Amino acid sequence: MTNEAKPNVLVLLGPTAVGKTRLSLSIADEFQAEIISGDSMQVYRGMDIGTAKIKPSEMEGIPHHLIDILDPREPYSAAEFQTEGRRLIGEITESGKLPFIVGGTGLYIESLCYGFRFSEAVADEAFRAEMDRFADEHGALALHAKLAEVDPASAGRLHPNDRRRIIRALEIYRQTNTPLSESPAAQKPESPYNLCLIGLTMDRQILYKRIEERIDEMLAEGLVEEVKRLMERGCGRSLVSMQGLGYKEIAAYLEGEMTLEESVTLLKRDTRRFAKRQLSWFRHMKDIHWIDVTDSGNFSGNFKEVRDIIAGKFHSGLEYTSEQSN
C-alpha cells in the first residue's frame, strides 16, 4: 500500500510532564486535527487530577476522544484501545480532519500505529491470583525471574515492578506455549497509516523537577480527596484503574499503610521511574522526530519546529495558517 493510499495520522508522544497537552492544542488548531488520547488512565471518569486530564474548558474547541469513556471499575486494554482508535481514525479521516494521537502510553500508541495482533490467550483469573500470591510472598524479582526462564526477551523489556504485564506474559506462555516476544502481538508489521511521529524530550533533571512540581499541584488541587471519593464508591485497590500512579500511593496512605509524606515521596520516585521507562519504550520505536523542549519558554520556536516537520511529512497536503509564510 502506498503512502498516498494510507490515511495520514499525526502522533505526539513523550514522557509525563514534558508539555504535550499545551503543544497539542496549538498543533490541532493549526492542522485542523481531532485529538485521540493515547493515555491508558484518562479513559476513566472521576480520575481527573491524578491523570492530569485536560478540562473541557481547556480544550479550546478541539474535539478530544477516548477521555471519560469508562467507569473506573471497568477494565481497559491495549486491544480495546486499538479497536477504538482504528474506528476513530477512519471517522476523523472521513470527516476531512486529521487524526492526532497524543499521549504517553507506549504500548497503546505503538499497537495502534503498527496494527499489532494481540494474543488470543484468554484471561485466567485463577492463574493471575496464583501469580499475585507468589509475588506477594516471594517478591517482584522472583516473579520477574519466572518470566525470564520462559521468555527472556519480554523479561528484558518489562520492569520487575510491572506485575500486571509480567503476569500477562506468563499467562500467554502458559496457554499458548509461545513466548509473548515471539507471538503475533510482538511483531511490528508495516503501518496501515502514513505516520508522522513527533517525540518530546528534555533534560532529565528538569523533567524530574517538573514531575515533582506537578505532583505538588495535584495535591493542592485535591488528589487525596479524589482518591478517597473513588474508594468510597467501591473502587478497590485491586482494580486496574487504581493501580495507576497517584492512586495506588494515596490509597495506601488512606488505608493507614504509610504517612502522607511517605506516600508522596513514593509517588514522586515512581513517577520519575515511569518517565524513564516511557522514554526507553519510545526510543525503541522507529521514525520518531525528536524535539528537545528543555527551553519550555521558547514555545513559539518549538512549535515552529514541529509545524515544519508535519508540513514536510505530509507534503503540505494539509493547509495551515498564514504563519507558514511569515
Image: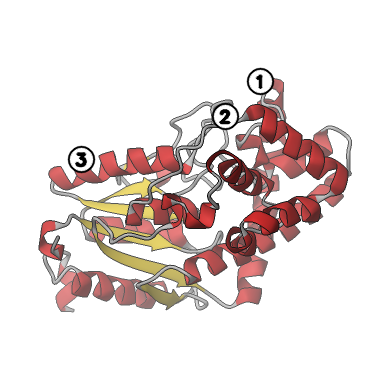
- Amino acid beneath label 1: Arg
Q: Which residue is mark 3?
A: 91
Q: Residue furthest front?
A: 177
Cα gap from disc 3 to disc 1, whole angstroms? 35 Å
Q: CA distance from mark 2 to mark 1?
A: 10 Å
- The residue that mark 2 highlights is 72
Please tell me the numbered disc located at residue 206.
Answer: none
Does residue 10 appear in the picture of this structure? yes
The residue closer to the viewer here, 288 or 181, is: 181
Report if residue 251 is visible in the image.
Answer: no
In percent of width and height, residue 261 lies at 85, 50
Name the residue at 59% across, 58% down.
Answer: 154
Tags 2 and 3 in contact by the CB under 8 Å rule?
Answer: no
Against 149, residue 94 (above or below) is: above
Looking at the image, is 138 positioned above or below residue 189? above
Hey, which quadrant is residue 256 in on the image? top right
Query: Residue 185 location in percent, x, y?
Result: 44, 51
Give the structural element (helix, strand or loop) at label 2.
Answer: loop
Q: Which mark is residue 233?
A: 1
- Name the quadrant containing residue 225: top right
Residue in front for this viewpoint, 210 or 149:
149
